[in-house]
Amino acid sequence: MDMPMPLPSPEVHPPAAARAGWWDGDPQESGFVATLISTRQNVSPKRLVEPGPSEQQLEQLFRAAAAAPDHGLLRPWRFVIVPMERRADLAEVFALALVDRDPGATLEQIESAREKAHRAPLLMLVVAQLGAVEAQIPALERMVSVGCAVQNMLLMAHGQGLGSSLTSGQAMQSPRMRRLFDLREGEEPVCFLNVGTVARRKTQRMHPEPQDFVSMLRRESGER
């Protein structure tokens, strides 16, 4: 088993300045943040093994999610942990959702669908609240907030020396999935978040260069 990357685990309680709602920044801290972001990898659930996060680490993950940008303070996300004793129920949803889509699915394909529910030590469903809200915050903006909450959790897991990944698929839109997780009107299942100890790491992928995706809004023709 590969040893986790030697990144220091953040404390559960942030520094006093952060608790007070401000932070002036620190060159050493910013360097750590840059390293944390640039070295994070998506680790397949097949390569995530025990031990999973401790209770303290799990609290850190959810505190990180709570720090995401949230226009209107709607908290348009929630997370549903799937404990080991409920993995079989999720496995059946994966299997039956496959049969619903493809009645001709082979036994091997059905068993493969079931197996996906039994991989990472920590498995949770990411749920987005995209229905009508009084604050009139657009659903797209709320979805950005959900993404920020998820990214905060992925980075926190990486800082803890754990691996993580996001998984989805056609089963996400199955009515069976909605029933299992008791999703309310306006709620949408986004993906599963997987966390655990990394059994084997892959080669770090190259990230795109900023000039490949950044442009400048130019002056209109004739403007001085």
Image (cartoon, helix red, strand yellow):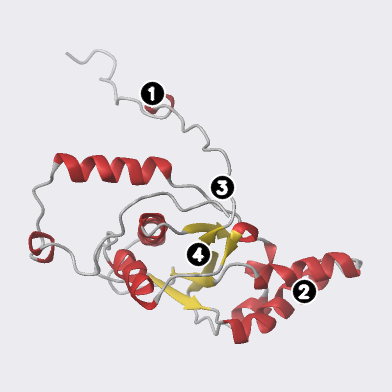
Q: Return the x and y of residue 194 as percentages of the image width and height.
A: 53, 64
Residue 207 in the image: state x and y as whole percent: 46, 33
Q: Which of marks 2 and 3 is nearer the N terminus?
A: 2
Which amino acid, by three-letter code, is at mark 4? Val
Mark nearer the viewer, 2 or 4: 4
Q: Is mark 4 on a helix, strand or loop?
A: strand
Upstream in the sequence, badge 2 or badge 4? 2
Upstream in sequence: badge 1 or badge 2: 2
Query: Label 1 sits on what residue type?
Result: Gln
Q: Exactly how many numbered labels are in the figure?
A: 4
Task: Identify residue type, mark 3.
Answer: Arg
Q: How far apart are marks 2 and 3 (CA)?
A: 29 Å
Q: Nearer the viewer, residue 123 or 9?
A: 9
- Name which residue type carries label 2: Ala
Q: Position of residue 153 (x, y in %)?
A: 39, 61
User: Which one is closest to the eye, mark 1 or mark 4?
Assistant: 4
Q: Which disc, if any, is residue 195?
A: 4
Q: Which of 95 and 184 is in front in this view?
A: 95
- As measured in the structure, the alpha-carbon distance from the residue carrying label 4 to the one carrying label 3 is 14 Å
Residue 211 badge: 1
- The residue under the point 69% across, 82% down is 88
Task: Tell me which residue sits at (44%, 74%) in the image.
Answer: 79
- Name the residue beneath numbered marker 3: 201
Q: Distance between the residues labelled 1 and 2?
A: 44 Å
Looking at the rendering, in which quadrant would you find the C terminus? top left
Is 38 on the left or on the right of 201, as rendered?
A: left
What residue do we see at 75% from left, 68% from top? 113
Q: In this view, does 177 lie above or below 6?
A: below
Q: Dot 2: few (<14), some (14–19), or many (≥20) neighbours within 10 Å?
A: many
The label nearer to you, 1 versus 3, is: 3
Q: Name the disc covering residue 95, or none.
A: 2
